[in-house]
Image: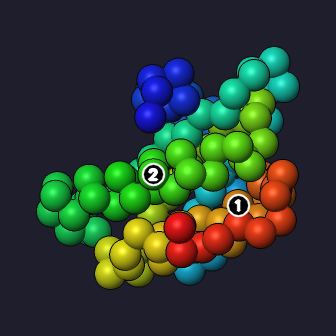
Amino acid sequence: MKKKLRIKKNDEFQRVFQKGESFANRQFVVYVLDKPNQDHFRIGLSVSKKMGNAVERNQIKRYIRQSFLELMDDIKTGRDYVVIARKPVAEMDFFQVKKSLIHVMKRSQSLSYKSRNVNMES
């Protein structure tokens, strides 16, 4: 994922936490902050050390980033997203992670489908 699409700095994370709106399901909490003057979206990831060792945490982050890459055309721009993974994600495969992220992104009204037939298994 390109660097301009990532949130890395602590103060940027804190701004999204404090001023953004949160949406959740059992697997993820997603904070959304509108940034109308931004022509792209940015994501920040948080995976707790309770989720496993570094290898497992990095795999979860790769799954989340790949899901965002595959959904890139459908995600509304001009927003910052912070995704926090919860404990059940540690036992999920990529397709389950993507399906769960789609669910929570729909709840946050952050997906604008250009094509209505999004295949969960692709």
Residue found at x 45% / y 23% = 3
- Local packing at callout 2 (Cα closer than 10 Å; few below 14, some 14-19, many 20+) is some
* Earlier sequence position, callout 2 versus callout 1: 2
In this rendering, the answer to whether 90 lies above or below 22 is: below
Residue found at x 55% / y 40% = 43
Please state if 113 lies on the left or on the right of 16 as rendered: right
Does residue 54 appear in this view? yes
Query: What's the coloring here?
Result: rainbow
At label 2, the amino acid type is Gln
Q: Which mark is residue 66?
A: 2
Residue found at x 26% / y 53% = 58
Residue found at x 75% / y 22% = 39
Q: Quarter-wise, where is residue 57 in the image?
A: bottom left
Q: Which mark is residue 118?
A: none
Q: 45 and 111: which one is in front?
A: 111
In this rendering, the answer to whether 96 lies above or below 13 is: below
Q: 117 and 90: which one is in front?
A: 117
In this rendering, the answer to whether 60 lies above or below 21 is: below
Q: 118 and 80: which one is in front?
A: 118
Residue 88: percent from left, percent from top: 41, 80
Residue 76: percent from left, percent from top: 78, 42
- Label 1: element kind: helix
In this view, the residue farthest toward the top is 37
At label 1, the amino acid type is Met
- Label 2: element kind: helix
Q: Do the numbered discs 2 and 1 sit on residues whose CB atoms are within 8 Å?
A: no
Does residue 23 appear in this view? no
Badge 1 is on which residue? Answer: 105
Residue 21: percent from left, percent from top: 75, 51
Please state if 7 lies on the left or on the right of 109 as rendered: left
In this rendering, the answer to whether 107 lies above or below 59 is: below
Placement of the N terminus among the 4 image quadrants: top left
